Amino acid sequence: MDIYQRIESFLEELGLTQYESQVFIALFKKSPQFARDISKSSGVSRGRIYDILKTLNHKGLVIEKTRKGTPNIYELITYPQCIKKLQENRLKELEGKIDRTKTIIIELKTYLGEIDREKPEEHDLTKDDPFSIVKGQASIDYYVKKFLSEAEQSVTTNFTADYIKRYEEEFVSVKEKNLAMTFVLPETEFPQIKDITKGTKRFIIGLKDLNLKIMKVFKDVRPLILMIDEKKGITIFQMDPINALIAKTEFFIQYQKHILSLFIEGSIKLD
């Protein structure tokens, strides 16, 4: 990509069309010019050049000068004015899109609120249904947030820092309830969640090495576990497609504790 192609690309990102960008560059190289000359230097046909010049004039980038007895001549505004005007035009356009987006969201919520919805079914996490499998990130997000909101005593997890930050708002809510929180994650990831864990009743365990027994058991697929009050939990298997096991019975709770214990082996407590 040569310099002119790059400039043209930038101008298009700032809101000009391809033809407008070509005419802008032609006038930037030499200004003022007659329309016929701009057509030749820009590569824009004579049939379109006047419309393009008119549009650039409306955008405040090109000045049209009329001389008696001669064709109109076109001149690009000064270089500093060009930069300022391109920026102003683009920001104004984006502000309009932001305002429109806000209006659309308000109207969308209003119309969606008029639709009768059936209450979504939830998995029956009783002893009759000892575990459930959920698939897809959206479903997993729903249950992780739900479980965190229902915590009353403790939260234990070996979520990665990225996963903890994904549910930052929910973890902060748990912290505000002053519940016991245990995080088991690689020592190098701990600084990423300091803002979330600061001031919590917490026990931080830093993994010195992830090449533990658990890695051999699951063949490098690191299971992520969230245990709530030691009564129910969710184990996320990071496969494609991503899926998770939701458990409430004693057997599966012990299963999750066992996996966590494998992670904790060979780890160190962090301050």
Image (tube, rainbow, N blue to C red):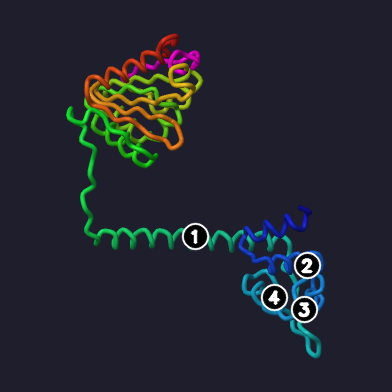
Badge 2: residue crowd in 10 Å (few <14, some 14–19, many ≥20): many
Q: Which label was assigned to residue 26?
A: 2
User: Residue 26 at x, y = what percent?
Assistant: 78, 67
Amino acid carrying label 3: it is Ala
Q: Residues within 10 Å of mark 4 (few under 14, many from 20)?
A: many
The residue range painted magenta reads 201-215
**Callout 2, which amino acid?**
Ala
Are the residues at dot 2 and dot 3 in contact (C-beta closer than 8 Å)? no
Please report the residue visible at 23 percent of the width from the left and 32 percent of the height from the top: 150
Q: CA distance from mark 2 to mark 4?
A: 12 Å
Tell me whether the residue at label 3 lies in contact with that at label 4, contact meaning CB atoms closer than 8 angstroms: yes
Q: Which residue is mark 1?
A: 95
- Would you say 191 lies left or right of 17 here? left
Which amino acid is tagged 1?
Glu
Amino acid carrying mark 4 in the image? Leu
Q: Position of residue 217 (x, y in %)?
A: 43, 17
User: CA separation, marks 3 and 4?
Assistant: 8 Å
Residue position marked by numbered label 3 in the rendering: 35
Check if residue 9 falls in the magenta segment.
no
Q: Residue at x 24, y 60 (%)?
A: 115
Residue 37 location, quadrant: bottom right
Residue 200 sits in quarter: top left
Secondary structure type for disc 4: helix
State whether residue 140 is above or below residue 100.
above
Asked if residue 141 lies left or right of residue 241, the reply is: left
Residue marked by disc 4: 53
How crowded pointer 3 is (Cα within 10 Å; few <14, some 14-19, many 20+) is rated as some
Position in image of residue 28 (x %, y %)? 77, 65
Could you tell me which secondary element the residue under label 3 belongs to? helix
Are dots 1 and 3 in contact, CB under 8 Å? no
Q: Which is nearer the N-term, disc 1 or disc 4?
A: 4
Q: Residue at x 72, y 68 (%)?
A: 77
